[in-house]
Amino acid sequence: MSRTGDVWWKNAVIYCLDVETFQDSDGDGIGDFNGLTQRIDHLAGLGVTCIWLMPFYPSPNQDDGYDIVDYYGVDPRLGTLGDLAVFVRTARDRGIRVIADLVVNHSSDRHPWFLSAAADRNSPYRDWYVWRDEIPEGGPEDLVFPDAETSNWEWHEETKQYFLHRFYRHQPDLNIGNPAVREEICKIVGFWLQLGLSGFRVDAVPYLLETHGVDLDTHDWLRDLRSFTMRRCGDALLMGEVNLPYQEVRRFYGDEGGGELNMCLDFNMNQALALALVREDAGALVHCLRAMPALHADDGWAHFARNHDEWSLDKLTEAERQQVFKAFGPKEDMQLFGRGLRRRIPTMLKGDQDHIRLVYSLIFALPGAPVLFYGEEIGMAENLDIPGRMSVRSPMQWSDEPNGGFSSAPPEMLSRPVVTGGKWGAKVLNAAAQEHEPDSMLNWTERLIRRRRETPEIAFGEWSFIPFPDAAIFALRYDWGGRTVLVLHNLGKRACRSECRPDGAEAWASLTNIFGQGGFDLAADGSLRIELPARGVLWLRVRPR
């Protein structure tokens, strides 16, 4: 147990939020750090141990803050550096660490660096970006946003060259091959660590490391960044967004020796989850777990049901993707880029509470740390009236007051419209009401988080499958320090009974239910019989003889 605090991220419960849509304290229709600080006890009571802040830096806001014009400041709409410092201090007082998005694969085209680079080919910042006289052969051709862009290269008329942008044209890529850029990134990291952050979610890591012919071992540089981060803050986290097949993701941890990212968001498991839910069959999850590469003992995976972007299904086959679309987003306006869904879990599952809770129990039971997106604790829906990926980033629903208690501003002044309607709107679905409902999604999530924190076997133990023959049952076993935990999930819409004989179960004296519902019986010969309700979950702790 003594090591669990040193590598805190392995057993963390991470909560991702956008300051702009969480709580408005001054009535201007925009969430801010003062409002977030006022709501910190909601997160502390929930049991969250780490808050992940989406970008809060000064920005033209053409891409929800991911187009940055100053890496050392706070967007004035959201408050001041002082307000952020108060928030970080208050979170720490409640036992919550804070990490932030590190978005350094590109800047805004309005950043002073790019303005200088674009003004003159002889600018000292010219080589901070990637320029070419002609679009190079063999360069990147896949488009991140095919609805808005037709090329990754943009012609700059004033200086007669193309500049690279893997995202939007107003987000020119920084040149990681330039030592001055790498040094600046270290300064940015050091600055925010000095102000009390506990690490970063590193945005779009594969795009960050693309150098297009520059003679640089980018993985050596990522290892240097990890070393720098550890020197400045020994227990800081670098969590990467790496949406690649498993064996390619493994490289970003530093191969077998570690030393690069501490953690990666697991997009492979997230897409397997979608397929398993649709098919009511654990096969996709089993296959994905078998493909999951082993990590250094100090590294871990971050598992999520829904993130702040579209639910990308790019790694599924076309037939599999269409199967998920048909079940979870059959209408064209529910889909995005032909590869993903712009809905939240509750609406995709038609409000079925058992099904929704099954999803989150699964996320918390996978080998890694769970990540929640704000509003998931109350079962918030998306707002499809908000364009594109922003549909899942509507204001938090706190109460049945106007604007869901998010802001006292007139509705037309809100930075983004709230969810409305008789089933999903704040009049019906809000945190204040759920606090008083013993079996609400909010109180159930709090119990789930508490049980997960009390079960470090999931974070630190060796996992293995429990061989139940029923394809709808997804069952894992965790062994750690002489302790054993079983986590069972019925993905089917019908109750099920099944039996198997886990390895070494003849040495078990009994089983204790620590979360969920269902029947179980352990025979003297080690045979385990279980009964799970439809969409049922059951976590059991083994008491050895």
Image (spheres, rainbow, N blue to C red):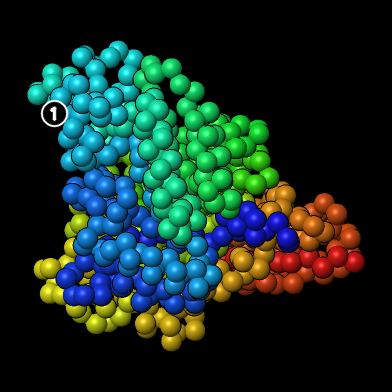
Query: Foreground: 329 or 240?
Result: 240
Q: Is residue 16 above or below residue 200?
A: below
Q: Position of residue 371 (x, y in %)?
A: 48, 57
219 on left or right of 309 = right
Q: Residue at x 21, y 34 (%)?
A: 114
Quarter of the rendering occupied by the N terminus: bottom right
Quarter of image, res 9: bottom right
243 on left or right of 32 = right
Q: Position of residue 205 (x, y in %)?
A: 42, 37
Q: Position of residue 349 (x, y in %)?
A: 40, 61
Q: Position of residue 357 (x, y in %)?
A: 50, 66
Q: Is residue 304 above or below residue 258?
A: below
**Residue 285 visible in the shown view:** no
18 on left or right of 291 = left
Tag 1 residue? 119
Say few, some or many: other residues with alpha carbon within 10 Å of mark 1 (under 14 / 14 to 19 / 20 or more): few
Quarter of the rendering occupied by the C terminus: bottom right
Query: Foreground: 155 or 398?
Result: 155
Q: Residue at x 24, y 21 (%)?
A: 131
Secondary structure beneath dot 1 equals helix
Q: Residue at x 50, y 38 (%)?
A: 225
Q: Residue at x 85, y 54 (%)?
A: 504
Query: Foreground: 88 or 62?
Result: 88
**Residue 256 visible in the shown view:** yes
